[in-house]
Image: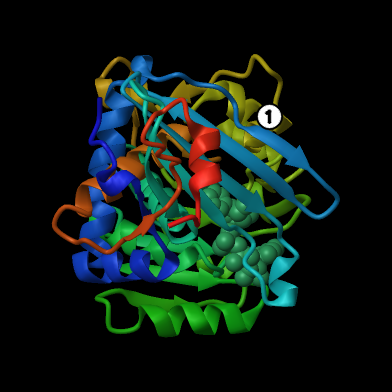
Amino acid sequence: MIQPPALNTVPFISVENMMNLVREVGVERFLTELSEKIAEDFLRWPLFDKTPRVAAHSRDGVIELMPTSDGIAYGFKYVNGHPNNTRDGLQTVTAFGALSDVATGYPVLMTEMTILTALRTAATSALVARHLMPKHVRVMALIGNGAQSEFQALAFKAICGIDEVRLHDIDPSATRRCAANLAGRGLKVISCDSAQEAVMGAGIITTVTADKTNATILTDNMVGEGVHINAVGGDCPGKTELQRDILTRARIFVEYPPQTRIEGEIQQLGADHPVTEFWQVLTGAVPGRTSDAEITLFDSVGFATEDFSALRYVQHLLKDHPHFDHLDLLADPDDPRDLFGMLLRAGVA
Ligand code: NAD
């Protein structure tokens, strides 16, 4: 049984409190510690209940539920992806989630997960890259400069030692905002007019664009030998970023193949195209990068265990950083079977 809820309420982390928590811990420390939690859970991968996320597709986007459990705790995230939302001043991706005690089924944490998703996605990307990138690489191209982008840049700085990011977005104002937000954080930031220019000299290429289409953010001629590609934006059926020829040249690493085959870049390939599960690189069961010339590709779609790790990490942080409210979420009649009596007595006093 995990920590029971105090006062029959559930700790709730609002957006404001998540910002307090992240600022108090520090973004780079948060990303680094979170990547360690994600790695710990990848190392116990066989323990987890795993299923491709449940997706409700509509014309403009998708709403997804992402559950998992390690047998002691159960976590789930609700997340959407609506690339046109930003036109109306809304986020492309918003999320919230909960952690529960498997022994009682009672929730022990509820939290916003929009900020937490950006952090966990960046922490996962950098964790994977640290195991696959060529050792000498210090320069990353970052194509797509929206909500996820600064988190990606800072995770690669903190976890992979990147010291230069080369930004590109079809919307120059997004690049300007990203560059301004990254100023003074120890990264050399170069703004580029094209994706072609952004990838010049970059040993890591991150694509994190949003468009509900089979886009071609990278063409085959833009990817040289030895590059590590962190492909984050292709995460839905019919929503990809890479030209197919890149996939057939690269060694492809994924989170959970049954989900990635539906949602990832590899939806462009046959169902039997070989992929490597990243958790097996972490355990040492299969090698990561095998030569300086190899092109490695992390076909990121985001998997439930990463959100579970993030939920456990913030739950742990609350002990020293009590930035939460008490949510009145659990009915608590004096006699557990007298739920109706509790309703009758409500307001009588
Ligand atoms: P966002 O809408 O805030 O930003 C996307 C940016 O991409 C925008 O600035 C847009 O102008 C730019 N863009 C679109 N087409 C482009 C092109 N052809 N070339 C260059 N730039 C282009 O979205 P976000 O929250 O930053 O998310 C980005 C993507 O990442 C989304 O597709 C989202 O679904 C995905 N995502 C994946 C994961 C994961 O775990 N893999 C997690 C979170 C988000």
Question: Looking at the picture, how far across and down is residue 110, in whole percent?
Answer: 42, 49
Question: Can residue 199 be seen by looking at this rendering?
Answer: no
Q: Secondary structure at mark 1?
A: helix
- Residue occupying the point 28% across, 83% down: 184
330 and 172: which is toward the camera: 330
| Quarter placement of the C terminus | bottom left
- Residue occupying the point 59% across, 48% down: 79
Residue located farthest toward the left when viewing the structure as drawn: 320
In the image, is residue 138 above or below residue 259?
A: below
The residue identified by callout 1 is: 262
Q: Quadrant of ligand 1?
A: bottom right
150 and 76: which is toward the camera: 76
- Residue occupying the point 75% across, 51% down: 61
In the image, is residue 279 above or below residue 145?
A: above
In the image, is residue 227 above or below residue 12?
A: above
Q: Is residue 267 left or right of residue 7?
A: right
Q: Is residue 113 left or right of residue 249?
A: left
- Residue occupying the point 64% across, 41% down: 64
Residue located farthest toward the right when viewing the structure as drawn: 59
Question: Looking at the picture, how far across and down is residue 206, in whole percent?
Answer: 49, 55
Q: Is mark 1 within 8 Å of ligand 1?
A: no
Q: Is residue 88 left or right of residue 232?
A: right
- Identify the image quadrant of residue 44: top left
Packing grade of label 1 (10 A; few <14, some 14-19, many >=20) is some
Q: Amino acid at mark 1?
A: Ile
| Quarter placement of the N terminus | top left
